[in-house]
Amino acid sequence: MTNPIIFWHRRDLRISDNIGLAAANQQSDKVVGVFCLDPNILNSEDIAPARVTYMIGCLQELQKSYLEAGSQLIILKGEPTQEIPKLAIALNAQGVFWNLDVEPYAGERDRQITQTLKEQGIPIQTFWDQLLHSPSEIASGANQPYTVYTPFWKNWISKPKTEPVERFKNRETLTAKEQEAINQAGAIPLPTAKDLGFIWNNKLILAPGETAALERLEEFCNQAIFSYKEKRNFPAIDGTSRLSAALKFGAIGIRTIWDATLNAMAGSSSDEAQESVKTWQQELAWREFYQHAMYHFPELAEGAYRQVFKSFPYDNNLEHFQAWCEGRTGYPIVDAAMRQLNSTGWMHNRCRMIVASFLTKDLIIDPKMGERYFTQNLYDWDLSANNGGWQWSASSGMDPKPLRIFNPASQAEKFDPQGDYIREWVEELRSLPTKQLITGEIPDSQRQKLGYPLPIVDHKIQQRVFKERYNQQKVE
């Protein structure tokens, strides 16, 4: 009788193009999957109900995929450092396989589990799956990690990319005795998000699971990718892939996505279309740049990278912060974006930059507060991308252009010129002429009549105050 290999799913909730799962499948006729509901994550204050809802939906489809392949996905709930070894011992597993993660918590958890399994004589194998190039593959000429994107991109794009790996196909089912061992090891039925205490009644931007992600990729690469460079910054247009949550949870493989970009490039009918495909490839590289940065500089998760911002005198006005959270700052484009986030668990990327700049440069509030609010609400939240984006907008991160301040009115004028996005999310302003809508130049009496707040700060004044503090900090 063959003892099974256990494949531990974490951020790879699919059976196609999964490097670690494919390796387990090649090495054994009997492979079972496991997912552990981790209280260290689920009991955190910083977890979005929309994100748990998406994750559970992915797990529901993953369970079905395992059953169709003749195997099963085991669900555990508890400390992974205890539950994974307990299951491996109960099944007398010939090994435990998993794909690695760049996040500090995951690294520490994996070290503990590795030590426990080694003490029990159970072999482990780990793989890099969520990146096209692992953190050790991309380094400067001095063999140092990159801290600037452009040289990272030039190195990254020059290297050959791995093709998608074979879909999981199991060949041998568990015995009744092994099934009993699984039950005794604490296996539970997959709970709903509501069972776990998370309520999300709104529709998700992308339906959970591998099937929906693959369908969305095909749809995007058949049309929107060819005008991506031109349309990606306009929040009223469906011009982006919206695959961020699928990438965060690994409902789709990064090699599958890269393969699709190569096919799109080959099918491009113009230089403009090819440039758009390349622009999206560069966004995929930005994702990896931030993940590599988090791996090499885990202190990024705790605060600013640049020294000048490590003790920056932020105001941290809590009333202003609450107004920002609720989308009632009196700046229409900012409020539209925050209301989109609160209603859908998602925000267009251009708007993420606008609201982050507004919080840090206009309200002069610590970016960690905004970063945390995103963590609590985004269904596609990813530590590396969220942290990288906030540090970019706050000018506190790895960025050769250290001070960048967005003017909300000019951003709206450029990227929502007809006011369609603002009208969609700021209902009380829909009747206004477009110019008033995008500039925010609305008389106080009219604001009062419409039930829309006065601007909580003056952009020009706050811009000057921020620059003065920044220059003073540089001197000190």
Image (cartoon, grey):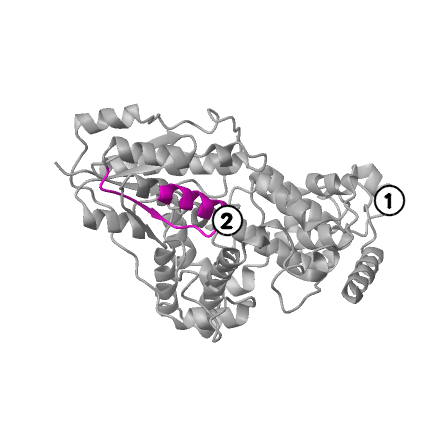
- Residue 415 is left or right of residue 365, and the answer is left
Q: Residue 355: x percent and y percent?
A: 68, 51
Quadrant in which residue 2 is drawn? top left
Quadrant containing the C terminus is bottom right
From this viewpoint, which residue is outermost toward the bottom? Answer: 141
Quadrant in which residue 4 is drawn? top left
Instruction: Report which residue position mark 2 lands on.
Output: 104
Q: Secondary structure at mark 1?
A: helix
Is residue 257 in view from this perspective? yes
Q: Residue 388: x percent and y percent?
A: 58, 56
Quadrant containing the N terminus is top left
Instruction: Report which residue position mark 1 lands on.
Output: 444
Q: How many marks?
A: 2
Kindly indicate whether the residue at mark 1 contacts the one at mark 2 (C-beta within 8 angstroms): no
Tell me the residue at 73%/39% (across/down).
Answer: 322
- Is 434 in the magenta? no
Tell me the residue at 38%/70% (across/down).
Answer: 159
Above-or-below relation of 177 to 369: above
Tell me the residue at 43%/73% (across/down).
Answer: 270
Tell me the residue at 62%/52% (across/down).
Answer: 352
Q: Which mark is residue 57?
A: none
Judging depth in this view, the residue of 366 and 352 nearest the camera is 366
Q: Residue 249: x percent and y percent?
A: 43, 45
Give, as a single range, the part of the protein colored magenta: 93-115
From this viewpoint, which residue is outermost toward the left? Answer: 1
Name the residue type under label 2. Answer: Pro
Above-or-below relation of 261 to 316: below
Is residue 349 in view from this perspective? no
